Image (tube, helix red, strand yellow):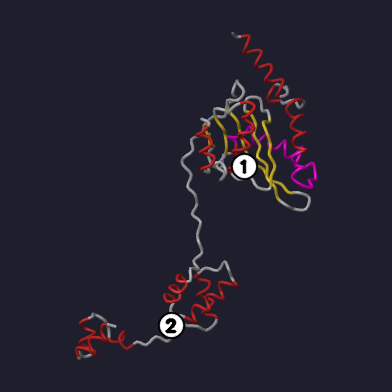
Amino acid sequence: MLAEYAITVHSASVNRACRLLNMSRSSYHYKPKLANDHEIKVVLANLADKHRRYGFKKMFNKTRQFGHEWNHKRVYRVYCDLKLNLRRKPKKRLPRRNMVTLTQPQQANISWSMDFMSDALDYGKRFRTVNVIDDCNREVLGIKASISLPSKRVTEFLDSIAFGRGYPRQLRVDNGPENISKEMVKWAKKHNVHILYIQPGKPAQNAYIERFNRTYREEVLDMYLFRNIADVQAITDEWMLGYNNERPHESLGNLTPQAYIERLLVSTNALY
């Protein structure tokens, strides 16, 4: 301490030493109740081990319950030294999304819509599906079921669909974490696909896939008990064939997706 140095080496009085260093005499004479922070560290470490989600305020109040009268600033310093701070995940800010009118393309492979759904196997294990349809004729391009669907797996699934029909001009999606990920943006840029994000909280802007999800939920997910993911995928694949080739759609003039696109091709060729 500088005051102690001035007093012992330069024979200055306590008053003079404190005045020169701009400190109070009470601060000079203060003796900490704890020689070190060992006891505080032990108490905080035990609390953190028992209550993993407690923040500083909870821990400090617990120390007071135990009868410790440690200064809150000292406890907080030790709390930070032990790296017990709970990491707060900041809310990811989305860029402004402009409303785009939902229109039906008059040609296949112009616009796809994609969305995710979730359900559970018969023993409670959760799984997810990623659903992709063509906005032109509501054809189901693919449904993939899996316990986990990270962005990498989703883009690989989109590549498998595009392998037989090419990539669309745009992909309509919501603002889910998979859709706004760097992996998805990189995929879209690589294949020259415009990702059309709907406005947050506006599922009606992605009405085609939302309406499809309801049908898939009622006719597959709520209709069967699945033992494993293979069951989900097998039943889904069989159902998709009937959906595309046998099920009439009121929005398509009671035609099936396959019949609608065939009629559209005939009428388009007739114009030329």
Q: Which residue is mark 2?
A: 36
Compared with residue 35, is residue 147 higher up or lower down, i.e. above or below?
above
In the rendered structure, the answer to whether residue 61 lies left or right of residue 134 reads: left
Q: Are marks 1 and 2 in contact (CB under 8 Å)?
A: no
Residue 134 coordinates in the image, percent (x, y) = 63, 28
Instruction: Tally the marks.
Output: 2
Q: Quadrant of residue 155?
A: top right
- Which mark sits nearer the N-terminus, 1 or 2? 2
Q: Which residues are magenta?
A: 204-233
Q: CA distance from mark 1 to mark 2?
A: 53 Å
Which residue type does callout 2 highlight?
Answer: Asn
Q: Residues within 10 Å of mark 1 (few under 14, many from 20)?
A: some
Residue 89 coordinates in the image, percent (x, y) = 51, 56
Magenta span has 202? Answer: no
Q: Which residue lies at the image location 76% right of the left edge and 33% below the top edge?
A: 239
The residue tagged with tag 1: helix, strand or loop?
helix
- Identify the mark at residue 153; answer none if there is no mark: 1
